[in-house]
Image (tube, rainbow, N blue to C red):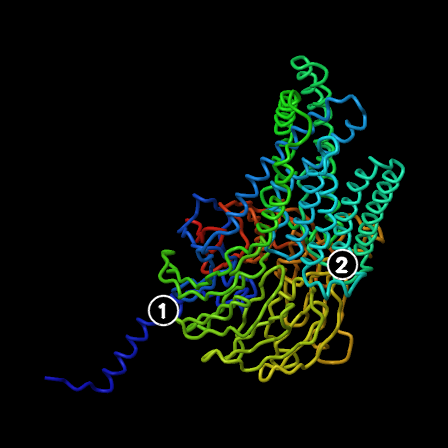
């Protein structure tokens, strides 16, 4: 029998229910991190405390292996963690691997016999043949360098220029070597010379974007192409001059001198163009300057001493002839080492060449064991070559005919290897993890699309996703936009945006008025998009018609700000800062402010304190008055320029450091804190832009700093995180290291730190 409740009982039960719900409504609600930089958090923790010390085995609450590859920062709701990842789909027939194996097998046969011929040539006392032997050794070590480092340094899939450049170098060397050593009255030099002239035509046909390239003859890119085509043709002329010298020594010598002068002129043109580009005389060049020199310059001198000692030991066993051969090989090896060392450091100042060569990953650098590794390696190689040359010296003169004929198929195999694409399709996905345990709850259906060009330090899943609590939105460049619900079911996809950049996509999506906002500026298109969050349809898209970086496009993330009482989307481009109406995307205002440094690659985003914007360029920092942005007044409050500081002779620690490009700075306790890509941490006074302190993290960095209370966290690509006091003076509180590099920004929630490394997601929590 039901007993009716009086109004007094109803009030009592309601009060009791509210008492039970009070903890849920107040203290039990978990902190969230809903999108890029935590959206409203701006990379600041809600709590005033967070972990100070950790390691792979200390203060780790849980650790989860993340399948695939991605650099996106995790986002956090009350019970879930979401992030993106990508993996390549299994290829069909691995043509690139097949071509590579055949090229290596064919090349080993070819170059072993070439080395044998070089050793035979050294048996003649004629000094001209000794010079020829030295030249062959230089070519041989150049080939070894290309063979070992090609995939790491040239990175064929990153830019179309790289495979072209590799084919040019490889072809010139291979065809020249095929005609260099032949028996008396051999046709090898004639055939090789004609082959090199024909190869020049092949290079012209393979030039990427041939029509547009040759329409800008003053560009460094075009000069680079023309230089290497000229080198191929002139090398062929050298061989033809050698053939002509048999019948007419004077005519042959004249032809060879003309070829040498032509080679010198081509190289000089390239150097002049590079120097002009360095001083911003030429337009349309890259700013990718993160080349790390593989060797320190001083390594050449102890290396030469070690090889001379090796030569003396060889003399005692094989005699003076072997010692002479050893000295030649040693000198050639370390001359190449010296060239590589100087070349590496020169690349730091020639931006376009540096962009082409990129950043070697596993090449030892002066930061670790790169100071000593060439010595034992070179000693063993020198001794082995000396012994091999001594044994082969008893053979017959010249290269066997079948070996010379290997030059053409060897070059064809290498070209096929260089031009064959990597597995073209990549699957991008959203992952959900349980916030308490780190267990992977689900993986969304993949968004399959072309891999595209991706810098080796970028990934196919770099932009940070964003959530409104019900749906998760992820942007993957030309692969499209993916929207899934909390159960991982696909709600909608949109493949309309097209992105093409040699760095890969990095701009993260944001939410505004039930619209998903994405900046999609690259060589493919230059639009600011707004998608309907419910359907994925394009609500509006605006062609910004602004200048973009020629190779990188624009990787900066827009932000929704309220300026003079009006909500608007603020976009910092290559050289502009502009505001857009969220309703229809029309431009409200725009200011051209310049790239803030030499060929700045737009990656990091501005930061705001509600009254001013702070823009950190590659060599300049600017403060803008937000209230003046929608007006015609000059919004610049102050403008710090590194070049002007250096001209004034400011000490190094008071001079703005170079290369604040990828990590987005942060404001905390009324101070600015920033990090360069090279790992330099520094503080600035936002009142006048004065440098407060400068210190080094010691490692390259792409992750943006975060703030927890009185602490700033700086992370590196090798897994190191420095914890620094948010003060006017530098004070390092701790230095922590995890397994794997950190590319994503750290996420501070509920006193914990979520740290994504290359393979794992860590939840760091200090034990009481």
Residue toward you, 313 or 557 = 313
| Residue 498: numbered disc | none
- Residue ranking furthest to the left: 1
Residue toward you, 668 or 272 = 272
The quadrant in which the N terminus is found is bottom left
Expressed as whole percent of the image width and height from the top left, the position of residue 382 reads: 65, 26
Expressed as whole percent of the image width and height from the top left, the position of residue 238 reads: 80, 41
Expressed as whole percent of the image width and height from the top left, the position of residue 50 reads: 49, 54
Residue drawn at 58 percent across, 76 percent down: 529
Q: 745 above or below 583?
A: above
Upstream in sequence: badge 1 or badge 2: 2
Residue drawn at 57 percent across, 51 percent down: 715
List the residue tagged with mark 1: 487
Q: 388 above or below 140?
A: above
| Residue 222: numbered disc | 2
- Residue ranking furthest to the top: 316
Please name which of the two marks, 1 or 2, marks the residue nearer to the observer. 2
Expressed as whole percent of the image width and height from the top left, the position of residue 113 reads: 63, 31
In this view of the protein, can residue 101 be seen by the observer?
yes
Label 2 neighbour load within 10 Å: few <14, some 14-19, many 20+:
some
Residue toward you, 220 or 180 = 180
Residue drawn at 61 percent across, 50 percent down: 415
Cα distance in 3D space between marks 1 and 2: 52 Å
């Amino acid at each position: 029998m039901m007993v009716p409740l009086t109004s007094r009982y109803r009030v009592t039960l309601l009060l009791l229910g509210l008492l039970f719900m009070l903890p849920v409504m107040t203290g039990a609600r978990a902190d969230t991190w809903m999108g890029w930089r935590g959206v409203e958090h701006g990379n600041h923790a809600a709590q005033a405390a967070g972990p100070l010390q950790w390691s792979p085995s200390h203060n780790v609450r849980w650790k989860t292996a993340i399948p695939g590859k991605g650099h996106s920062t995790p986002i956090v709701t009350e019970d879930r963690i979401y992030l993106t990842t990508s993996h390549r789909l299994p290829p069909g027939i691995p043509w690139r691997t097949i071509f590579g194996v055949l090229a290596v097998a064919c090349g080993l046969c070819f170059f072993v016999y070439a080395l044998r011929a070089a050793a035979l040539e050294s048996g003649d006392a004629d000094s001209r043949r000794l010079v020829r032997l030295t030249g062959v050794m230089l070519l041989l070590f150049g080939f070894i360098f290309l063979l070992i480092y090609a995939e790491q340094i040239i990175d064929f899939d990153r830019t179309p220029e790289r495979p072209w450049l590799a084919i040019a170098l490889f072809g010139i060397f291979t065809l020249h070597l095929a005609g260099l050593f032949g028996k008396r009255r051999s046709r090898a030099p004639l055939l090789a010379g004609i082959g090199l002239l024909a190869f020049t035509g092949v290079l012209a046909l393979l030039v990427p974007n041939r029509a547009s390239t040759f329409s800008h003859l003053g560009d460094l890119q075009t000069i680079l192409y023309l230089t290497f085509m000229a080198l191929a043709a002139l090398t062929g002329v050298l061989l033809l001059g050698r053939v002509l010298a048999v019948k007419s020594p004077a005519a042959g010598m004249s032809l060879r001198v003309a070829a040498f002068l032509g080679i010198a002129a081509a190289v000089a043109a390239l150097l002049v163009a590079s120097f002009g580009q360095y001083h911003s005389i030429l337009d349309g060049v890259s700013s990718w300057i993160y080349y790390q020199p593989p060797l320190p310059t001083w390594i050449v001198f102890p290396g030469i001493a070690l090889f001379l000692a090796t030569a003396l030991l060889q003399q005692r066993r094989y005699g003076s002839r072997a010692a002479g051969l050893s000295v030649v090989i040693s000198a050639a090896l370390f001359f190449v080492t010296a060239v590589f060392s100087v070349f590496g450091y020169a690349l730091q100042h020639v931006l376009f060449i540096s962009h082409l060569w990129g950043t070697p990953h596993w090449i030892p650098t002066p930061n670790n064991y790169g100071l000593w590794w060439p010595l034992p390696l070179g000693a063993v190689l020198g001794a082995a070559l000396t012994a091999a040359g001594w044994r082969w010296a008893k053979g017959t003169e010249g290269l066997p005919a079948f070996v010379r004929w290997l030059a053409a198929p060897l070059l064809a195999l290498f070209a096929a290897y260089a031009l064959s694409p990597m597995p073209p399709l990549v699957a991008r996905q959203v992952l959900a993890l349980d916030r308490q345990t780190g267990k992977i709850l689900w993986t969304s259906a993949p968004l399959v699309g072309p891999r595209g060009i991706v810098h080796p330090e970028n990934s196919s899943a770099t932009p940070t996703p964003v959530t409104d609590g019900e749906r998760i939105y992820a942007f993957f460049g030309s692969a499209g936009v993916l929207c899934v619900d909390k159960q991982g079911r696909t709600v909608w996809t949109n493949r309309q945006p097209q992105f093409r950049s040699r760095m890969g996509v990095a701009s993260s999506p944001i939410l505004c008025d039930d619209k998903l906002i994405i900046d999609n500026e690259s060589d493919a298109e230059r639009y600011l998009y707004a998608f309907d969050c419910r359907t994925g349809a394009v609500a509006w898209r605006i062609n910004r018609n602004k200048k973009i970086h020629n190779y990188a496009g624009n990787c900066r993330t827009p932000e929704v700000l309220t300026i003079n009482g009006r909500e608007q989307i603020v976009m910092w481009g290559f050289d502009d800062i502009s505001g857009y109406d969220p309703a229809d995307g029309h431009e409200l205002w725009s200011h051209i402010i310049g790239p803030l440094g030499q060929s700045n690659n737009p990656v990091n985003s501005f930061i705001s304190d509600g009254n001013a914007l702070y823009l950190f360029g590659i060599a300049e920092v600017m403060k803008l008055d937000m209230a003046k942005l929608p007006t015609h007044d000059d919004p610049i409050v102050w403008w710090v320029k590194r070049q002007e500081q250096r001209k004034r002779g400011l000490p190094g620690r008071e001079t703005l450091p170079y290369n604040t490009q990828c990590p987005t700075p942060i404001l905390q306790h009324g101070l600015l804190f920033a990090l360069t890509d090279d790992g330099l941490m520094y503080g600035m006074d936002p009142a006048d832009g004065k440098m407060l302190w400068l210190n080094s993290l010691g490692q390259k960095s792409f992750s943006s700093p975060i703030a927890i209370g009185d602490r700033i966290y700086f992370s590196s690509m090798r897994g190191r995180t420095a914890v620094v006091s948010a003060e006017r003076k530098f004070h390092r509180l701790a230095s922590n290291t995890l397994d794997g590099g950190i590319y994503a920004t750290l996420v501070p929630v509920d006193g914990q730190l979520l740290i994504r490394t290359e393979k794992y997601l860590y939840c760091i929590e200090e034990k009481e």
